[in-house]
Every structure is written in structure tokens, then in C-alpha cells.
Image: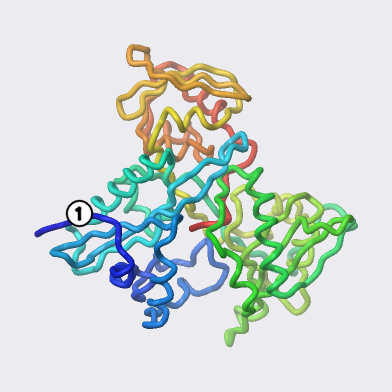
Amino acid sequence: MTIEIRPVTRAEAKDYLRVLPWVNGFPQEEPEPSAWYAGRAANPPQRQATPEQLEQYADELLTDWFRPQAAFVEGKIAGGSAIVSVQITLPGGRQVPMGGVTSTGVLPTYRRRGLLRKIMAAMLDDCRERGEFLAGLSASEATIYGRYGFAPATFQHRWEVRRTDVSFQTPFTDPGQLELVDGAEAAAVWPVLHEQVRAVRVGEVSPLPDKWSGLADGGPAYHLIHRDAAGQVDGAAIFQLPWSPDPEYAGELQVEAFEALNHDAYRALWGLLLDFDLTKRVVAARRPVDEPLRWMLTNSRALRLARTRDNLWLNILDVQRALTARTYAATDSLVLEVDGVRWRLETSKDEAACTAAPGAAVDVSLTVSELGSLYLGGVRPSEFRNAGRITEHTRGAVSRLDAVLRPDRAPHNAVGF
């Protein structure tokens, strides 16, 4: 069997697309209610792309930010994936390039032949050549990508609350103003708002081109914005009020996107969404795991978690560059052994240094997979120690590493790729 891994040409673009689940109508998400989707269906319906859509997708495929690789078996494309060029915000606020793995699939008739492993190796080599020391993805299944060095780094909640249970702890007078707007205005607001959010949110990702352009085309969603006292937009939400023949799900308001730059915008937006006329339940998707709303309610149990799942998975492609690029919460010096290679990490709240330390005594040993989960602060080192996944060689070293990596807020990314 002859296998070749290489980028695709424009003439091969439609054949590449045909192996992808979202194009050929195959499942692309596990059959459970997703944390990123506020609807009640386990998965949004899948449909095969039409010939016209295939032609359109092929025209859009080969850009400077979309880098596809395909596995050719005896000259025929049997699997493929791609890297998109994005940025991610690190602790300390630095935004660095990241290779985002997307559009991945292997035809069912070619599985178990190592094609995905070969494709992944080619794409990660491409990331290294371009100077991207991080790669990221959103995993359709939790058991696939760990074997390639990826590990969950951010997490998200899907929650719901009954409208009749909602009461806020403190009274609130909005100094700004809420406004329902059309899709065209929402399409103009969201890119600006997201840039402000991702400048301060660890784990947030830059959007792909035309991320919000489709809002202008209309659709079933409603668009709510908040303006501050000066008239500047400082928050927005996208929600739906789907009709249901089942009384159990009738009157449900589904929040698909929500961002606020400050407390006033946050309180005003949720105040309306949780008390919208003629509704009885609110379901919210893609919410951060440290959502403050629960602690603003008189009944904290009113906010019920429906699903928690991993979101962004990270692969540390260059340990030294990665550990130097972010800032840390405490000053310390630790020797970390990552996959057998020893590094001395010296940290402060303003800068960090990571140098090779081949002869130094090791404080903590771990794999690059564990490091991917710890890197943004989404998982604590002590959690992995208690699970038997990292080893403490110096007493108290894991607690020190906890303190060093501790984030002010849980890392979160509302935008994917």
C-alpha cells in the first residue's frame, strides 16, 4: 500500500473535502448534548454538501491561513486535516501564533491504517517550521488526540435555570442601555467586542475570517447589545426562542453567545435574558467554568449545570519557548523534567526564563501532554499528582508549581476554529 502525505492542490480540493465529516454528512460530535450548543438535540442535523456547496468550499479552501494536508492511498485521498493560523492569549496578556487543527477526517473504509498519525505528524512539523510553538484543537472524542500530544486545556459549562427561580442578591440600576438590534448591526459589533475580550482573557482565540459575517444574513437568532453611559457597546448576546411541540421544552430561551466587558454590562444582559417575557427556562452554552452569575443569585442552586466538557486541547511543540512566553503568579525556581528532558523554570510576575538543565536535580517530572493541560492554568498540577500522572521528586514542589501556574480566572475560549 503506497501512502503519501502532502498538501492538496486546487484541483484536489473537492476530493479532500469529501473525506471530512461535516461535508459528507457523517457524525462529527459524540451523541450527547454538547456544552457548545444550547439546543436540546444531541447534535445539530448533518447533511451532505451539495455539488454547489462543494465548489464554493473548494474556492475558499486554499488561503494563506488554511493549510490542508491529505493522505493519498494509491493516489486517492483517503483522509485529511488542516491547520488554520490563529492567535491565543497567554497568561500575562501576550497573544502568540497557534496552529489550529481543524477539518479532520479519514474515510471509514481506510481507518486503522495509521493515516491520521501520519497526517498529524506532517501538520505539526509545518507548525514548527512556521514558528508556532503551540498547536490546538477541539476534540470530537476524548480518546483520539492524546496519542499525538494534545491535552485538554480549557473547559466549558452548559447550564440552565428556571425563570421563576431567578432573583438577584442586590438591586441594580443600569447606567447604560440595552438594545435589540438586527443581524447587520450585530455583525459589526461582535468583531470589535471580541478583540477587546481576547486582549484580557487567557485562552481566548482569534476568530477566523468572516466569523460573524453570516449574522447579517438574518436567521432565527435575536441580537441583544448593551451600551455604556457614553454609548459604547460593552456587551452583547445572541439568543434564540425556538418553538417546540413538546410543552416540556416550550418557552425556552437558548443563549448561544454572550460577552460583557464589565460588571454593569454583564448584570444588565443577564437580567433581561433571565426574565424575558413569556419564557420559563434559560439554557446557556459555551460558558466559562467560573461563571460569576451563580453567586449573584439569591438561590445559587437555581443555576443547574447540564454539561461540563473540555474545549481547547493544547500541544506544546517547543517547551522552552512556551514556558518563557507566559507570565506566572509567583516567584520561584523549579526543575521540570518533560518527557525525559530537564528544564529550569525561573518565574516572576513580570517575566520568566526557561533554560536547559541536564544535570540538575528534578523537582517535578511529567509528559508534554500533562504540560498542555497545565499551561494555561485550566488544570492544577496537584490534580495530576493526585491522579498519579505527574511525579513529585522534591517535597512541596507540586504545591509550589500550583502557586506558580495559578490563574486569576479560569482560562476560557468562546471562539473556536
Q: Position of residue 334 (x, y in %)?
A: 47, 18
Residue 19 visible to an observer of this rendering: no
Name the quadrant of the N terminus: bottom left
Q: Position of residue 12 (x, y in %)?
A: 28, 68
What is the three-letter code of the residue carrying label 1? Gly
Decide which of 134, 342 is in the foreground and name it.
Answer: 134
Give residue 344's quadrant in the image.
Answer: top left
Residue that carries the numbered disc 1 in the rendered image = 114
- Residue at x 51% of width, y 47% of height: 154
Q: Position of residue 16 (x, y in %)?
A: 30, 67
Q: In the drawing, does residue 404 fall left or right of residue 9? A: right
- Residue at x 70% of width, y 68% of height: 186
Q: Badge 1 local density, few (<14 within 10 Å), some, or many (20+)?
A: few
Q: Position of residue 42 (x, y in %)?
A: 46, 71
Q: Secondary structure at mark 1?
A: loop
Q: Is residue 256 above or below residue 398?
A: below
- Residue at x 40% of width, y 21% of height: 343
- Residue at x 25% of width, y 68% of height: 107
Q: In the drawing, does residue 180 fall left or right of residue 403? A: right
Q: Is residue 343 above or below residue 247?
A: above
